[in-house]
Image: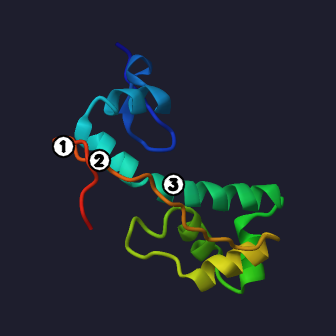
Amino acid sequence: MTLTFSPNLGMPFTDSLMKTHDEMLREWRQDPAFVREYDSLAQEFALFDELLRARQGAGLTQAKVAERMATQPSVVARLEAGGGRRKHSPSLATLQKYAAAVGCRLEIKMVRLPPQRTAATGTRPRA
Protein backbone atom coordinates (compact mmCIF):
# COMPACT_ATOMS: atom_id res chain seq x y z
CA MET A 1 0.00 0.00 0.00
CA THR A 2 1.40 3.39 -1.00
CA LEU A 3 0.77 6.31 1.31
CA THR A 4 0.67 9.73 -0.30
CA PHE A 5 -0.35 13.19 0.84
CA SER A 6 -3.11 15.31 -0.58
CA PRO A 7 -1.65 18.66 -1.67
CA ASN A 8 -4.82 20.49 -0.62
CA LEU A 9 -5.42 18.88 2.74
CA GLY A 10 -1.94 17.78 3.81
CA MET A 11 -3.52 14.53 4.93
CA PRO A 12 -2.38 11.03 3.97
CA PHE A 13 -4.61 8.93 1.74
CA THR A 14 -4.32 5.90 -0.48
CA ASP A 15 -5.75 5.57 -3.94
CA SER A 16 -7.28 2.22 -3.02
CA LEU A 17 -9.25 3.83 -0.13
CA MET A 18 -10.66 6.81 -2.05
CA LYS A 19 -14.38 6.60 -2.72
CA THR A 20 -16.54 8.78 -4.90
CA HIS A 21 -19.30 10.87 -3.38
CA ASP A 22 -21.90 8.50 -4.85
CA GLU A 23 -20.13 5.47 -3.37
CA MET A 24 -20.00 7.04 0.08
CA LEU A 25 -23.62 8.13 -0.14
CA ARG A 26 -24.70 4.64 -1.21
CA GLU A 27 -22.85 3.17 1.78
CA TRP A 28 -24.20 5.73 4.26
CA ARG A 29 -27.77 5.27 3.02
CA GLN A 30 -27.66 1.77 4.51
CA ASP A 31 -27.90 3.42 7.95
CA PRO A 32 -31.55 4.27 8.84
CA ALA A 33 -30.45 7.18 11.08
CA PHE A 34 -28.47 8.70 8.21
CA VAL A 35 -31.43 8.28 5.83
CA ARG A 36 -33.80 10.04 8.26
CA GLU A 37 -31.44 13.00 8.74
CA TYR A 38 -30.51 13.22 5.05
CA ASP A 39 -34.16 13.12 3.97
CA SER A 40 -35.09 15.75 6.57
CA LEU A 41 -32.67 18.13 4.84
CA ALA A 42 -33.97 17.51 1.31
CA GLN A 43 -35.89 20.80 1.13
CA GLU A 44 -32.85 22.78 2.28
CA PHE A 45 -30.64 21.03 -0.26
CA ALA A 46 -33.19 21.84 -2.97
CA LEU A 47 -33.14 25.54 -2.01
CA PHE A 48 -29.35 25.75 -2.14
CA ASP A 49 -29.24 23.86 -5.44
CA GLU A 50 -31.77 26.33 -6.83
CA LEU A 51 -29.67 29.31 -5.71
CA LEU A 52 -26.60 27.88 -7.43
CA ARG A 53 -28.50 27.07 -10.63
CA ALA A 54 -29.93 30.59 -10.78
CA ARG A 55 -26.54 32.24 -10.30
CA GLN A 56 -24.77 29.96 -12.75
CA GLY A 57 -27.61 30.34 -15.25
CA ALA A 58 -27.15 34.11 -15.05
CA GLY A 59 -23.43 33.64 -15.68
CA LEU A 60 -22.49 35.49 -12.48
CA THR A 61 -19.80 34.99 -9.87
CA GLN A 62 -20.51 35.17 -6.16
CA ALA A 63 -18.60 38.45 -6.11
CA LYS A 64 -20.84 39.96 -8.80
CA VAL A 65 -24.01 38.79 -6.99
CA ALA A 66 -22.65 40.28 -3.76
CA GLU A 67 -22.00 43.58 -5.53
CA ARG A 68 -25.57 43.63 -6.87
CA MET A 69 -26.90 42.83 -3.39
CA ALA A 70 -24.67 45.50 -1.79
CA THR A 71 -23.03 42.93 0.47
CA GLN A 72 -19.82 40.94 0.80
CA PRO A 73 -18.98 37.82 -1.28
CA SER A 74 -18.68 35.82 1.95
CA VAL A 75 -22.38 36.50 2.63
CA VAL A 76 -23.33 35.06 -0.78
CA ALA A 77 -21.01 32.07 -0.26
CA ARG A 78 -22.58 31.38 3.15
CA LEU A 79 -26.09 31.72 1.69
CA GLU A 80 -25.33 29.25 -1.10
CA ALA A 81 -23.63 26.85 1.31
CA GLY A 82 -26.57 26.61 3.65
CA GLY A 83 -26.43 29.63 5.88
CA GLY A 84 -23.66 28.33 8.10
CA ARG A 85 -25.06 24.87 8.87
CA ARG A 86 -28.44 25.67 10.37
CA LYS A 87 -27.16 28.55 12.48
CA HIS A 88 -29.23 31.01 10.51
CA SER A 89 -31.99 30.67 7.97
CA PRO A 90 -32.04 33.32 5.24
CA SER A 91 -34.84 35.86 5.49
CA LEU A 92 -37.36 36.38 2.71
CA ALA A 93 -35.83 39.82 2.13
CA THR A 94 -32.38 38.27 1.60
CA LEU A 95 -33.76 35.64 -0.76
CA GLN A 96 -35.61 38.36 -2.70
CA LYS A 97 -32.41 40.43 -2.99
CA TYR A 98 -30.52 37.36 -4.19
CA ALA A 99 -33.23 36.55 -6.73
CA ALA A 100 -33.19 40.11 -8.09
CA ALA A 101 -29.38 40.04 -8.26
CA VAL A 102 -29.46 36.95 -10.50
CA GLY A 103 -32.34 38.22 -12.65
CA CYS A 104 -35.10 36.16 -11.05
CA ARG A 105 -38.07 36.66 -8.81
CA LEU A 106 -38.70 34.63 -5.70
CA GLU A 107 -41.76 32.37 -5.61
CA ILE A 108 -42.89 30.45 -2.56
CA LYS A 109 -45.77 28.02 -2.68
CA MET A 110 -47.52 25.61 -0.37
CA VAL A 111 -47.94 22.06 -1.64
CA ARG A 112 -50.68 19.93 -0.10
CA LEU A 113 -49.43 16.63 1.27
CA PRO A 114 -51.45 13.46 0.85
CA PRO A 115 -53.36 12.41 4.00
CA GLN A 116 -51.26 10.21 6.26
CA ARG A 117 -52.56 6.86 7.38
CA THR A 118 -51.55 5.12 10.58
CA ALA A 119 -49.89 1.74 10.22
CA ALA A 120 -52.02 0.09 12.89
CA THR A 121 -55.51 1.00 11.66
CA GLY A 122 -55.05 2.16 8.09
CA THR A 123 -57.05 5.32 8.90
CA ARG A 124 -56.09 8.97 8.99
CA PRO A 125 -55.21 10.34 12.43
CA ARG A 126 -57.58 12.99 13.82
CA ALA A 127 -56.42 16.57 13.94
Of 33 and 126, nearer the camera is 126
Secondary structure beneath dot 1 equals: loop
Do the numbered discs 2 and 1 sit on residues whose CB atoms are within 8 Å?
A: yes
Do the numbered discs 1 and 3 sit on residues whose CB atoms are within 8 Å?
A: no
For image coordinates 37% across by 32% down, the residue present is 12
For image coordinates 23% across by 47% down, the residue present is 118
Q: Residues within 10 Å of mark 3 (few under 14, many from 20)?
A: some
Q: Is residue 13 left or right of residue 80?
A: left
Kind of residue sitting beneath label 1: Thr
Q: Residues within 10 Å of mark 2 (few under 14, many from 20)?
A: few
Q: Residue furthest top?
A: 1
For image coordinates 38% across by 39% down, the residue present is 11
Q: Is residue 122 left or right of residue 69?
A: left
Q: Is residue 7 left or right of residue 122?
A: right
Do the numbered discs 3 and 2 sit on residues whose CB atoms are within 8 Å?
A: no
3D distance between C-alphas at marks 2 and 1 = 8 Å
* Residue that badge 2 annotates: 117
